[in-house]
Image: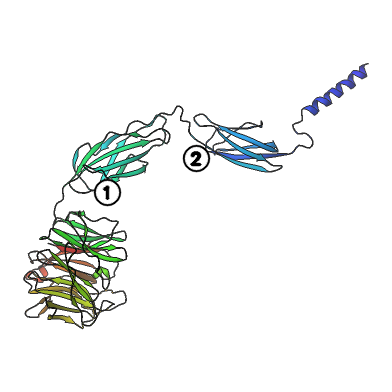
C-alpha cells in the first residue's frame, strides 16, 4: 500500500512539471525591440509602459527610450505604449521565428489637462516709444504652466497700412527687426504657441522710428557679396540707406533734384535708379538701354546741373535720359569703338569729360567734348596703365582724375601706384595735387568738396584685397602740412554734395 502511494505521488509530480513549462514542443518564438520618442521634438521618452495584445511581457523604456521583449510567440500583435501626460499609441507588429521585429512609437502630448501659455507682455520698446533705430530689438515675456516649449510669431505693420509683415517660429523672447524706415509709426503684436493649445495674443504695441538727418556724404560698403549704400556726416556717423539684400553702388546726389542716383543689379543687367536721401521712393530710371561697359565697378554717370537729366555709358555710346525715365537719346559714339567707362557733365552744361578704354580697361583716353560731340580738349591718350575718377570744378576750368603712374597692365586690372592729378582746361597743364599717399597704396575715385577747398577719395592697398577707406584731404601751401583723415572706414565710391 505504501509503495502504491509513492507511485501515485511521482506520477502527479511529473504532470505538474509538464504543466509549468513556458514553451511547448512545436511552438516557435521571436522578439521585439524598439524606441519611444516625443512626436514634437523626437527626443527619447523614459519609463513608458509597453505591452501587447495578445498578451506578452510588460516592459518599460530606459533613459534612451528603448525597450526589448524576448521570447514572444510567432504571430500578429498590437503593441501599445502608455505614459502619463501623453496619448497612448498602438503599433501593429508581426513576430517572426528567430527574428527581432523593430517598432518605433511617437507619442503626442495629451491636451486633456494642458493649459495655454500666459499672455505675452511686450517689454521693449515701451509702448509709444519714439526716435527708435531702424534696426531694433523687440522683446517680451511669456510663461507656460506645464513648461511646454513656446514659439512666437511677431506681426508688424506701418500705421495706416494694411500690409502686415510676419516673423514666425521664434524660439526666444526677443527678435531684431531690420531695415525699418525713418519717421514711421509701427504697430506690433506677439503670439505665443505651446504646440497644443490655441495661440495667445499679446496686447498691441507701437513705436516710431527717428527722423532722417540729411547728411552730405554718400559711400558704399560691401556686406557679404553685395554693395550697400550708406549716408554719413562729417563726424563719421553713418546710416545704411539701401537694402543689404540688393547690389547697389556708385551713389551720386543731386541737391537740385532732391534725389540720389545709383547703379543697381537688375537680373543680368545693371540699371540706374534714383531714391530719396533716406533710401525711400526707389525708382528705376533706365530700362531699354542699361548702363554697361568695362567692369561694372568702374562705371560712372553724371547728373546735369538742374537735376533733370542723367548721362550714362553703354559700351561705345553715351546716352542722355530724363530723371523720370523718358527722353532716352544717344548723344555720342566713340569713333574707334572704345568703351566709355566714365563721364562728368560740367555745371554750365556745355562740356562733358569722358574716359574711354578697350575691353581690358587699358589704352585709356581722357578728353572733353562739347554738346555737338566735338573733342575740345584731349587730356590723355596712349598712356599705359589704369585711369579714372573724372570730376569738373564748378566753373569747368579744372578736372581731377586718377592714374596709375606705374603704367602696369595686368589681366586682373590691378593698379600699383595710382595718384590724383588735376588738369587745367585752359592752360592744358597737368599736375599731381595730393601728397602723403602711403607707399604701396592707391588713391581712387577723387571728388572735389562742395566748396572745392578739399578733396575726398578712396585709399587702399594695391594688393587688391585689403580694406578700403574714404579719405578727406585738406591741402596746404606746404605739402608736408596737408591732412589726410580717414572719414569712413571700410568704405569706397564717395560722393560729397
Q: Secondary structure at mark 2?
A: loop
Give the mark nearest the N terminus, 2 or 1.
Answer: 2
Front position among marks 2 and 1: 1
For the residue pair 67 and 476, the one nearer the viewer reads as 67
Q: Residue at x 25, y 50 (%)?
A: 179
Q: Residue at x 19, y 76 (%)?
A: 355
Dividing the picture into quadrants, the one containing residue 430 is bottom left
CA neighbours of label 2 inside 10 A, class few (<14), some (14 to 19), many (20+): few
Residue 82: % across, % down: 55, 31
The answer to the question of whether label 2 and label 1 lie on touching residues, with beta carbons closer than 8 A, is: no
Asked if one can make out residue 155 in the rendered structure from this viewpoint, the answer is yes
Find disc 2 in the rendering and name its residue: 43
Quadrant where the C terminus is found in the figure:
bottom left
Asked if one can make out residue 485 in the rendered structure from this viewpoint, the answer is no
Find disc 1 in the rendering and name its residue: 178
Q: Residue at x 39, y 29 (%)?
A: 145
Dividing the picture into quadrants, the one containing residue 128 is top left
CA neighbours of label 1 inside 10 A, class few (<14), some (14 to 19), many (20+): few
Q: CA distance from mark 2 to mark 1?
A: 34 Å
Q: Extreme front residue here? A: 327
Residue 429 disc label: none
Quadrant where the N terminus is found in the figure:
top right
Count of numbered marks: 2
Residue 302: % across, % down: 16, 68
Q: Secondary structure at mark 1?
A: loop
For the residue pair 122 and 274, the one nearer the viewer reads as 274
Residue 227: % across, % down: 27, 61
> In the figure, 156 relative to 449: above or below?
above
Q: Residue at x 77, y 30 (%)?
A: 21
Residue 267: % across, % down: 31, 63
Dividing the picture into quadrants, the one containing residue 119 is top left
Amino acid at each position: 500500500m505504501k509503495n502504491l502511494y509513492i507511485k501515485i505521488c511521482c506520477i502527479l509530480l511529473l504532470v505538474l512539471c509538464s504543466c509549468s513549462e513556458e514553451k511547448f514542443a512545436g511552438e516557435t518564438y521571436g522578439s521585439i525591440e524598439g524606441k519611444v520618442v516625443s512626436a514634437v521634438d523626437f527626443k527619447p521618452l523614459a519609463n513608458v509602459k509597453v505591452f501587447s495584445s495578445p498578451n506578452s511581457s510588460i516592459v518599460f523604456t530606459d533613459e534612451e527610450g528603448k525597450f526589448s521583449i524576448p521570447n514572444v510567440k510567432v504571430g500578429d500583435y498590437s503593441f501599445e505604449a502608455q505614459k502619463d501626460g501623453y496619448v497612448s499609441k498602438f503599433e501593429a507588429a508581426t513576430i517572426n521565428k528567430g527574428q527581432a521585429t523593430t517598432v518605433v512609437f511617437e507619442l503626442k502630448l495629451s491636451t486633456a489637462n494642458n493649459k495655454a501659455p500666459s499672455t505675452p507682455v511686450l517689454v521693449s520698446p515701451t509702448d509709444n516709444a519714439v526716435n527708435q533705430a531702424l534696426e531694433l530689438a523687440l522683446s517680451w515675456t511669456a510663461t507656460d504652466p506645464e513648461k511646454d516649449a513656446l514659439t512666437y510669431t511677431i506681426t508688424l505693420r506701418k500705421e495706416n497700412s494694411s500690409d502686415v509683415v510676419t516673423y514666425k517660429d521664434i524660439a526666444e523672447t526677443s527678435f531684431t527687426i531690420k531695415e525699418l524706415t525713418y519717421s514711421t509709426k509701427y504697430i506690433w503684436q506677439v503670439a505665443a504657441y505651446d504646440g497644443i493649445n490655441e495661440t495667445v495674443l499679446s496686447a498691441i504695441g507701437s513705436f516710431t522710428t527717428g527722423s532722417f538727418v540729411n547728411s552730405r556724404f554718400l559711400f558704399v560698403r560691401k556686406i557679404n557679396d553685395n554693395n550697400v549704400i550708406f549716408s554719413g556726416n562729417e563726424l563719421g556717423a553713418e546710416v545704411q540707406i539701401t537694402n543689404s539684400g540688393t547690389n547697389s553702388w556708385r551713389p551720386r546726389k543731386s541737391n537740385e533734384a532732391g534725389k540720389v542716383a545709383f547703379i543697381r543689379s537688375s537680373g543680368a543687367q545693371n540699371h540706374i535708379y534714383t531714391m530719396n536721401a533716406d533710401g525711400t521712393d526707389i525708382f528705376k530710371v533706365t530700362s531699354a538701354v542699361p548702363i554697361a561697359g568695362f567692369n561694372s565697378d568702374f562705371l560712372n554717370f553724371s547728373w546735369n546741373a538742374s537735376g533733370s537729366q542723367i548721362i550714362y555709358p553703354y559700351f561705345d555710346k553715351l546716352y542722355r535720359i530724363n530723371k523720370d525715365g523718358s527722353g532716352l537719346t544717344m548723344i555720342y559714339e566713340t569713333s574707334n569703338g572704345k568703351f566709355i567707362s566714365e563721364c562728368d557733365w560740367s555745371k554750365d552744361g556745355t562740356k562733358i569729360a569722358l574716359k574711354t578704354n578697350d575691353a581690358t580697361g587699358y589704352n585709356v583716353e581722357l578728353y572733353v567734348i562739347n554738346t555737338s560731340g566735338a573733342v575740345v580738349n584731349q587730356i590723355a591718350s596712349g598712356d599705359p596703365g589704369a585711369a579714372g575718377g573724372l570730376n569738373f570744378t564748378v566753373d569747368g576750368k579744372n578736372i581731377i582724375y586718377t592714374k596709375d603712374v606705374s603704367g602696369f597692365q595686368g589681366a586682373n586690372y590691378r593698379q600699383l601706384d595710382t595718384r590724383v592729378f588735376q588738369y587745367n582746361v585752359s592752360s592744358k597743364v597737368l599736375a599731381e595735387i595730393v601728397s602723403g599717399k602711403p607707399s604701396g597704396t592707391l588713391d581712387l575715385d577723387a571728388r572735389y568738396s562742395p566748396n572745392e577747398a578739399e578733396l575726398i577719395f578712396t585709399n587702399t592697398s594695391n594688393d587688391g584685397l585689403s580694406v578700403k577707406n574714404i579719405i578727406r584731404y585738406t591741402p596746404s601751401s606746404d605739402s608736408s602740412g596737408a591732412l589726410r583723415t580717414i572719414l569712413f572706414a571700410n568704405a569706397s565710391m564717395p560722393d560729397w554734395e
